[in-house]
Amino acid sequence: MNGGPSGFQNAPVTRNLVIFCAFLTVLFVARGRSTSLGFSYQDIIQRLRFFRVIPSIFAFSSIPELIFGVYLLYYFRLFERQIGSNKYSVFVLFSLSASLLLDVLALVFLKDRTTKILASGPYGLIFASFIPFLFDIPISSQIRVFGIPFSDKSFIYMAGLQLFLSSWKRSLVPTICGLLAGSLYRLNVFGIRRFKFPQFIESFFSRLSWSAPRRSPPRINVRRNVPTSANHHLERSFGSTTTSIVEPPESSVAILVSMGFDSNLARQALMRARNDINMATDILLEAQSR
């Protein structure tokens, strides 16, 4: 199990989230205002200090929390590569909104008027991501340490546990609400997993992306030697494979393989999608659902 190639390749939403969270956290810590992050029942219900919500959603209250939080956000970029940036943006928006609503409901129920029981930072998104991580990401390797079995997923759970324990009581409610938000998304409440942002919104944010320009590889005529049955399946699902296409870069094939797709099918999907990895992912998922 891995997140594919290193860096933020094909994960612009994750990159912008990491940069934004790190910037806000460092800004508040440097100015000595990290203690003002987070909100309580009194802030939201009585004084209506809604201006505290945005920085409290994205900024961590300490550098150790930032380190573990950014690491987890960076690792979970594999979901953006798996479902595409558009649908991942919907997942981010839903997770943050649903967990925030559950946080407020928890504050109303607990009616804590004295302390800020909620830790600041994107706990809702991070712990919502643990739900698909638990159910959809397979274990690829196992090791034993002093006779205790560990998988490659164990270290991610340990990082999540460390983040949870960093604020303890303050992080309990955001953690639970994040897990509930991830469960609601997985259960496809309101058909949320089918939602996508309109094309004009996606195009607008694509122009704001800081991705480096890509050089188009040379066009060549390719016909892959695959078994007859597999070739029939590919032609039925993806179309003919004998047209003039762009040879898929191995890095793109590796990303799709890391998601669990067969390398030959991944290559054919990339050919069909003209090396658009998000479109190739949609093609592969659609073919699997048939």
Image (cartoon, rainbow, N blue to C red):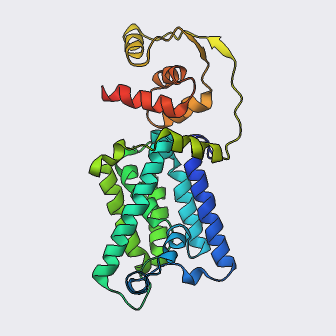
Q: Measured from the top left, where is residue 70 in percent x and y?
A: 57, 61
Q: Is residue 105 among the parts visible in the rendering?
A: yes
Q: Position of residue 114 (x, y in %)?
A: 41, 92
Q: Which of the 4 quarters of the picture holds residue 4?
A: top right
Q: Residue furthest bottom?
A: 114
Q: How many marks?
A: 0
- Against 117, residue 161 (above or below) is above
Question: Residue most toward the front?
Answer: 200
Q: Quadrant of residue 128?
A: bottom left
Q: Measured from the top left, where is residue 149 in percent x and y?
A: 40, 54
Foreground pick, 171 / 199: 199
Q: Nearer the viewer, residue 207 or 131?
A: 207
Horizontal relation, residue 163 to residue 114: left or right: right
In the displayed structure, 108 sits above or below 197; it is below
Q: Is residue 114 above or below residue 167?
A: below
Quadrant of the rendered structure where residue 61 is? Answer: bottom right
Q: Position of residue 246 (x, y in %)?
A: 62, 19
Residue 7 seen anywhere in this rendered image of the structure: no
| Quadrant in which the C terminus is drawn | top left
For the point 54% across and 20% down, the residue is: 271
Q: Residue at x 42, y 51 (%)?
A: 91
- The residue sitting at 43% across, 61% down in the picture is 96
